[in-house]
Structure formats: C-alpha cells, structure tokens
Amino acid sequence: MKRIMLAIIPALLLAAGLSRAEAPAGCESLPDLVKSAQENNPELKSSDARWQMFASKAKQASALEDPMLMLKLQNLVVRQPTSFDKDPQTAKVIGITQQLPFWGKRAIRQEVAQYEAESYKWAIEERKLELSRMVKETCYQLWSVGKQLEIVDKNLKILTDFVTIAESKYSVGQGVQQDIYKAGLEKSKMLDMQITLRQQRKSLEANLNYLLYRPGTATVGIIADFTLPEVSQTVEQLNRAALENRPQIKSLLSLTNKAQASHRLAQKEFYPDFNLSFEFMFREESMNDPGFNMYSLGVTFNLPFQQEKRRAMLAESTAETGMAAEELNALKNTIAYTVNDTLAQMDRRRKLVELYKRGIIPQAEQSLESAVISYRVNKVDFLTLLDNRMNLFNYERELYESQAEYMMQLARLEAAVGMELH
C-alpha cells in the first residue's frame, strides 16, 4: 500500500497545476483561414457576381433606345403595283425615328442604377465581415474544446489512479467501498464528457470546412494559444468608427440615395417623352409633275394624362425613401446596443480570466495539494481529495471557456464596428 501511494501521490501533485506547454508546430493561422474563406466561399462569389450584374445594369440605364429605320413604298397604284410614275403621290420612302426621354430622365435613371449597384458592392464587404466573424468564432470554439479535451484526458488518468488508490486502501481495510464507486462514477462522467467534446470538435471542424469551402473531412490543425487583447477605444469612438467603416451602413446610405433619386425620377414622369422622326421621299416624274424629292420632319410626344399612375409612383418612391432611412436608423441603434453589450461581456470575461488565473485556480491547486498530503497521512477522507480534484478540473474548464468567449465577443465587436481592433 505504501509503495502504491509513493508511486501515485507525486504524480497527483505534478498534475495539480495547469498545463502551460507551448503550442506544437503545425498550428492553424487565423488570418490565413479568414483569407481562404473570403477567397473560396461560394456565397461570397455569388454576391460578387450579383454586384457585377447590377454594375452592368447601371451602364445600360442611361442609354437611348435604338433608332427605328423605316422603309416603305407609298401610294402605289393597285392596278399597276410596280409602277412609280403613274401617280404624282407615289414615292419610295426611307425614314428614321428616335425616342428621347424628357430632359434629365436618363441621368437620373443612371443614378438610380448606380446607387443600387453600389449597395450590392457594400453588401459584399458586409458579407466578408460576417464570414470573418464566423470563422473566428468557430476557431475559438475549437480551441476551447481542444483545451477541455486535454484536461479531460489528464483527469481521466488521475481518476484511474484514484480508483487504484481506493481499491488498494479498501483491500487492506483502510477505506470504504463507497470511495471506489464514487471514483468510478466520476470517471464515467468524465468519459461521457469526453465523448460529447469529441462530437463537438467534429461538428466544429465540419463547420469550419464548410465556411472555407473545403471537403467536410479535411483535417483541421491545432488552433494556437493567444493572449487577450485590450480594446482601447471608448464606446463613443467605436460608434463613430462603425458609422465610418461599417459596410452595411454604406449599403443603406446607397439605398437611401437610390430612393431619393427614384423620387426625382417619378417627378419627371409628369413631363412627356418625345419621338423625333425624319422621312425622305424619292419621287419620279409623272402626269406633268416634275417628281421632286421631298422630306418630312416630325415630333410626337405622349400626353401625361394618367395622373393617378404618376402619383402612385411618387408615393412609392416616398415610401422607399422612408423605409431606407428607418432601416439605417435601426442599424445604428443595433450597432450602439451591440457595442455596449459586447464591451460589457468582454469586461466580464476578462475579469473572470484574471480571477481564475490569479485567484481561484492557484487556490484550488493549493487546496488539492494540501488534500493530497493530508490524505497521504489519513487526515482527510477520499471524497475530500476527489472533490478538490474535480473542483480544479471545473475551474480549468471555465477558464478556457472564458478565454474563448472573450475572443468570440471581440470578433462580434469587430464585425459590428467594421474594422480590426487589435
């Protein structure tokens, strides 16, 4: 029994502290993962193609309609359909017509199309921000799960040793059978946690591969350790930065400008469009008529009598302007809330990390070390030793979760503001 205790107790003391080994080679580079996602993600490519489509539409918006060429034989005599000299009114006619919208309509149509295309351009940048946030969140979750699996593996070995100690003490009449069952139960719970964490890691790896547009079975490397960066900007500075940098705000501003241009275009619809025409008639001498060639010039225009239709167009553009403006206000309100809430969450997580690192975990390590020594001389029971070990395990897990959550909140804050903050 003494030999077993002498062999196991030092191992327990050595395992009491947190593992601070350097990250092994072959770690994933977070900036490279984000870049890969932005280059390969098919949804982003689809958004880019949509922008190109609307940019091409903008080039078409101000173009004139094609001119119409007209060829006709005019006033032919039915009894002699191939003769052009039997009647002085007979002529070969060539003409051309061109439709011209009212002054200013073409420029406004191009303006509307350009603003719409611009909104899709900023939508691409917004999607990049969102994709970057999702990649970062997934990576930090992977890091947390990996760290938890490490301490689960470590504690499984320790609990196996605990079971051995409990069985050995029970076999020589120094322990109770309940200690064996309790250690075995904790080990089973740890195995259950290990199974769950491994499933979570596979799901997170599949999600990361999905975001990177890689095969679902592609290997994901180790996520490197990190330090918690501080956000030096104030709430007011972050809100101003969001107004300047957030692509979605710029997209909504473009839609607001588009709606205002559409309103001006609707006002122009109360004025007529024009159709210019030119005809040239080739005539031949007939019936004492010298057969001089002739030409005609003309202009036609629509009469904008359908006032109800045009008033509805004005109402539509007014509603569109109001909708875009209120969507912009709603986004600004959401950003302000997100900035305040995220900073509060980050502050809480940072304080928890400091508390775990400098207070709770060192104290739990000392408590475990004291329990191990006391158990060795039979001053505390086995359950006290086991509880101290499990407490330290839980605090280690909460430390890693808080570190990962801090970085995930930082990624959300960067997405809300539209810029890197560290």
Image (cartoon, rainbow, N blue to C red):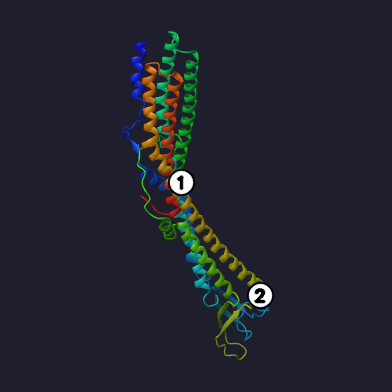
Q: Residue at x 40, y 21 (%)?
A: 158
In the current view of this chain or complex, which residue is farthest to the top? 172
| Disc 2, SS | helix
Looking at the image, can residue 139 be seen? Answer: no
Q: Is residue 413 above or below residue 55?
A: above
Tell me the crowding category of disc 2: few under 14, some 14 to 19, or many 20 or more residues within 10 angstroms, Cα based.
few
Q: Is residue 168 above or below residue 98?
A: above
What residue is disc 2 on?
307
User: Picture quarter containing residue 78?
Assistant: bottom right
Amino acid at pointer 2? Gln
What residue is disc 1 on?
345
Q: Earlier in the sequence, mark 2 or mark 1?
A: 2
Q: Position of residue 239 (x, y in %)?
A: 44, 58
Give the total number of marks visible in the rendering: 2
- Nearest the viewer among 365 and 61 is 365
In the current view of this chain or complex, which residue is farthest to the bottom? 288
Left or right of residue 151, residue 111 in this image: right
Real-space Cα distance between discs 2 and 1? Answer: 56 Å
Q: Position of residue 395 (x, y in %)?
A: 43, 32
Amino acid at pointer 1? Gln
